[in-house]
């Protein structure tokens, strides 16, 4: 996963739209004069866009692969560099690809990414043999279509169970439900190995609040406390 820091924030008003939306939010494929393409979503609010941008920073901090996020001038937009994918659905992942995706289960749970697998199983994809999370709009404090999660985004990481068991999220259950206790423990260790200070710094450096940072630290601690459940 990457965050592009070399390019200035893109302005879609100065780009050519060359394709339409692929997900549930208004979006399009845009091309700059050099031929470089971006997928740009217009979200419900600047707060929702900032929320996804922060989620991308946390995925990068954890080492979890995603598309490459690019800053935008419009505060309600979120953009990623366009990438041709070999697979675009959980159902199409082979056994090795499923294991790749499961490695990041702890990151999805930690960031409360209810939409990790996608409503249609379309938030996990493969490019050049690498499994990527394709959309982070359902992580942290907002649902994928922009509704705040409120108290459901709590200090306790209920997602450790929900992403594996919730019948209303069938593609997540299909992907994560068969993980062994050892798999779950390994995925949790990915998160609890991140330092509190790096979480604070990442959140604060990218426009987030100290309250959000402390919530992510509390959620990490909850995961650490529950690790013996899977050992």
Image (cartoon, rainbow, N blue to C red):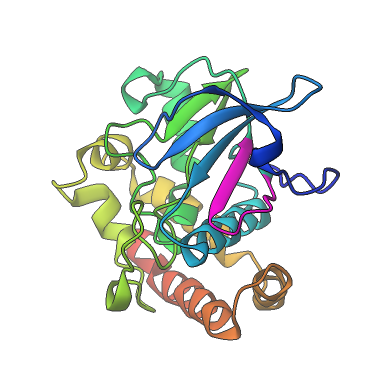
Q: Is residue 80 above or below residue 22?
A: below
The residue located at (71%, 43%) in the rendering is 2
**Residue pictured at 27% horizontal, 32% vertical:** 120
Measured as percent of width and height from the top left, residue 38 is found at 64, 31
Tell me the quarter of the picture where residue 75 sits. bottom right
Magenta extent: 70-80
Question: Among all residues in the image, which is located at the extreme top?
Answer: 86
* Left or right: 47, with 184 as reference point: right
Q: Quadrant of the N terminus?
A: top right
Q: Whole-percent x and y of residue 92?
A: 36, 18
Left of 80 or right of it: where is 2? right
For residue 2, side relative to residue 51 (left or right)? right
Q: Residue 99, image x and y in percent?
A: 45, 32
Residue placed most toward the observer, 80 or 221:
80
From the top left corner, tell me how far across and down residue 145 is, in percent.
33, 52
Q: Which residue is located at x 66 percent, y 77 percent? A: 200
Q: Quadrant of the C terminus?
A: bottom left
Magenta span contains residue 216: no
Question: Which is nearer the eye, 185 or 147?
Answer: 147
Q: Eyeballing the image, is 65 above or below 18? A: below
């Amino acid at each position: 996963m990457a965050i592009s820091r070399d390019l200035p924030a893109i302005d879609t008003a100065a780009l050519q739209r060359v394709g339409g939306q692929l997900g549930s939010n208004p979006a399009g494929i845009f091309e700059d004069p050099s031929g470089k393409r971006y997928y740009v979503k217009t979200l419900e609010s600047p707060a929702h866009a900032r929320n996804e941008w922060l989620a991308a920073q946390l995925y990068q901090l954890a080492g979890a692969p995603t598309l490459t996020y690019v800053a935008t001038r419009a505060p309600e937009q979120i953009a990623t560099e366009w990438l041709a994918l070999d697979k675009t659905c959980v159902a199409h992942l082979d056994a090795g690809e499923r294991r790749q995706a499961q490695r990041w289960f702890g990151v999805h749970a930690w960031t409360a990414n209810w939409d990790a697998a996608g409503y249609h199983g379309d938030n996990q994809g493969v490019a050049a043999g690498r499994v990527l999370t394709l959309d982070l709009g359902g992580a942290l404090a907002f649902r994928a279509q922009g509704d705040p999660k409120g108290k459901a985004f709590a200090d306790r990481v209920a997602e450790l169970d929900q992403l594996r068991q919730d019948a209303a999220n069938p593609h997540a259950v299909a992907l994560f439900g068969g993980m062994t206790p050892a798999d779950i423990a390994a995925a949790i260790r990915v998160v609890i190995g991140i330092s509190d200070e790096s979480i604070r710094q990442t959140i604060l450096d990218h426009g987030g609040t100290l309250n959000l940072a402390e919530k992510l630290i509390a959620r990490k601690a909850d995961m650490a406390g529950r690790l013996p459940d899977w050992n």
